[in-house]
Image (spheres, grey):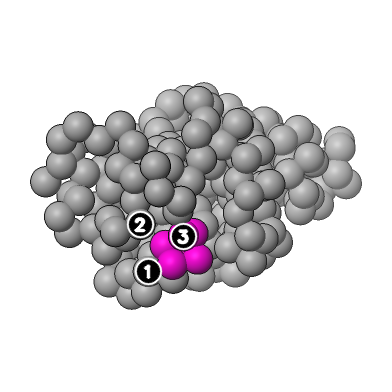
Amino acid sequence: MKRVNIHKVYSILEKQMESLKVPVVELIDIQTKDPFKVLLATMLSARTQDATTAKACKRLFTKVSTPKDLERISQVELQKLIYPVGFYRTKAKHLKQLPHVLKEKFNSKLPSTVEELIYLPGVGRKTANLVVAVGFHKPAIAVDIHVFRISNRLGYVKTKTPLETEIVLRKKLPKKYWLKYNMFLVAHGQSICRPITPLCSKCAIRPYCNRVGVTKSA
């Protein structure tokens, strides 16, 4: 297996972003510059396509801009606003719980570290890392299905779980790449490096990829 030149890969993916859609969470940050709304968008985006998440965020943000807004709105109305995102009932429940936990643990202020964010309802390490990186612009590595799949497919890591991938990337990936690594790989994974039958013939980073596990491509 050839050694992966992550500097070259990152440079190519960065250039490629000029022609790809920005993932929804990064788009929310660009539009709002609000870490709280980035958190809400990230929570809604789990197991949900970006187009659906974007529409749900647009509806939600007409009624919710602060934790106090979540206190005033009913869980049933939250369900209606965010439907049809994946697991919308559970997500509405977590949104409704959010202001209480923020008040109780963090004096109603949104924390900016992964270790604190994971105390919030519905927030796991992926969501926490994404909020830190995208919402607060601090170094963090969010590992979703795209980052997990592509990092392994490249041959840059050899891991079995997203958590293991995060741990390895924290040790191996240059810190200067942490902020945008997720965004680049999500955009690449949504458009080219698909889970099944990736578009290797159109992939700009193919010369640097070991194509681990790829049995069929287009």
Up/down of 31 relative to 40, above or below: below
**Front-most of residues 137 and 156:** 156
The percent position of residue 214, horizontal first and vertical second, equals 25, 35
The percent position of residue 13, horizontal first and vertical second, equals 38, 65
Name the residue: 73% across, 44% down: 114
Q: Secondary structure at mark 3?
A: loop
Q: Secondary structure at mark 2?
A: helix
| Magenta residue span | 5-10
In the rendered image, residue 6 lying in the magenta stretch gets the answer yes
| Residue 125 relative to residue 100: left or right | left
Check disc 1 and give the amino acid type: Ile
The reply to whether discs 2 and 3 touch (Cβ–Cβ < 8 Å) is yes
Camera-side mark, 1 or 3: 3
Q: Which image quarter holds the N terminus?
A: top left
Residue 208: which disc? 2
Q: Characterize the magenta stretch by its predominant secondary structure.
A: helix
Name the residue furthest left: 218
Mark 1 vs mark 3, CA separation in Å? 11 Å
Name the residue: 43% across, 26% down: 87
Q: On the image, which quarter does residue 88 sit in?
A: top left
